[in-house]
Amino acid sequence: MKNSWNSFYQAIISHKANLGKISKKFLYLLLAAVLIVVITRSVSPKKEKAKKTESIPVKVNVTQLTQLNEIIEYVGDVKADEEAIVYPKVTGKVIEKAKKDGDVVTKGEPLMYVDRDEVGLEYQKAPIESPINGVLGRIYVDVGTNVAPSTACALVVNIDKVKIELDIPEKYLPFVSISQPAQVRVDAYPDEIFNGEVTKVSPVIDISTRSAPVEITLANFDHRLKSGMFAKALLTVKEHKNVAVTQRKLLSARNPMPIFMLWRIIKRC
């Protein structure tokens, strides 16, 4: 009977040992499987990213040092350097025109004549004279019109020089000075630039607009600029020297290639 119990006990111990060996093998296999899954997942995204990565063409261009200017643009009307409205000295009726619109006149030259005859009296025809040298811009009255000393009869302008009045905001006034160069464009000559200079900067700022009147004067001996034209004036308020820039052609919309530009400001001592 004792031998039977010993045999049974040995069988149980042997069975436990076999189960232990099987459990260890299973554990090792399970750990190996987990490691394979982890490694596979960590490597797969890199492969996917590597597949999605594409080469981007880059075009390199040599920069050049140049000067860049900060420019402000404001609009105004062209005015003659001198303008004079002509009034008669006497009361009467216009009987004759001596000049027509666009004629060149001199100071004191008759533009028209007024008949000041009264009942019982006879007078010589009275001239209405130009007060300045210039061009007869416009005649406001016709022959037969009754005029008085308060009647505006004509406009004479001197357009050998013209001026443009601008309202410049106060923040730019420190950068605007007398004799400062200015560039002007007009719609009548869209591809041409007229050069002038600042001739007046008002010392008083308009409180309502926070701006000051600035006057630009241009030579106009060919009389192409007319009084009343709409003008755009450009003033350089700041200058940046030795700035590295690239060619504009790299920015052309005709080139479908993606473009990346690298630049830096180079200062010379």
Image (cartoon, rainbow, N blue to C red):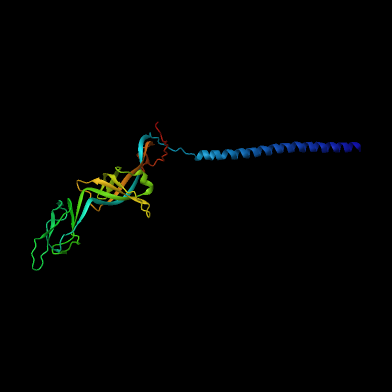
Residue at 79% x, 36% y: name it: 17
Residue at 77% x, 38% y: name it: 19
Residue at 13% x, 55% y: name it: 110
| Residue 267 x, y percent position in the rendering | 40, 33
| Residue 224 x, y percent position in the rendering | 21, 48
Front position in the image: 45 or 217? 217
Which quarter shows the C terminus?
Answer: top left
Q: How many marks?
A: 0
Front position in the image: 145 or 11? 145
| Residue 150 x, y percent position in the rendering | 20, 62
Front position in the image: 162 or 260? 162
Front position in the image: 201 or 218? 201
Q: To which quarter of the image does residue 67 belong?
A: top left
The residue positioned farthest toward the right in the image shown: 1
Above or below 199: residue 144: below
Residue at 20% x, 52% y: name it: 157
Judged left or right of residue 139, residue 246 is right
Above or below 251: residue 154: below
The residue positioned farthest toward the front in the image shown: 121
Above or below 65: residue 229: below
Judged left or right of residue 193, residue 119 is left
Judged left or right of residue 216, residue 34 is right
| Residue 40 x, y percent position in the rendering | 60, 39
Which quarter shows the N terminus?
Answer: top right
The residue positioned farthest toward the top in the image shown: 269
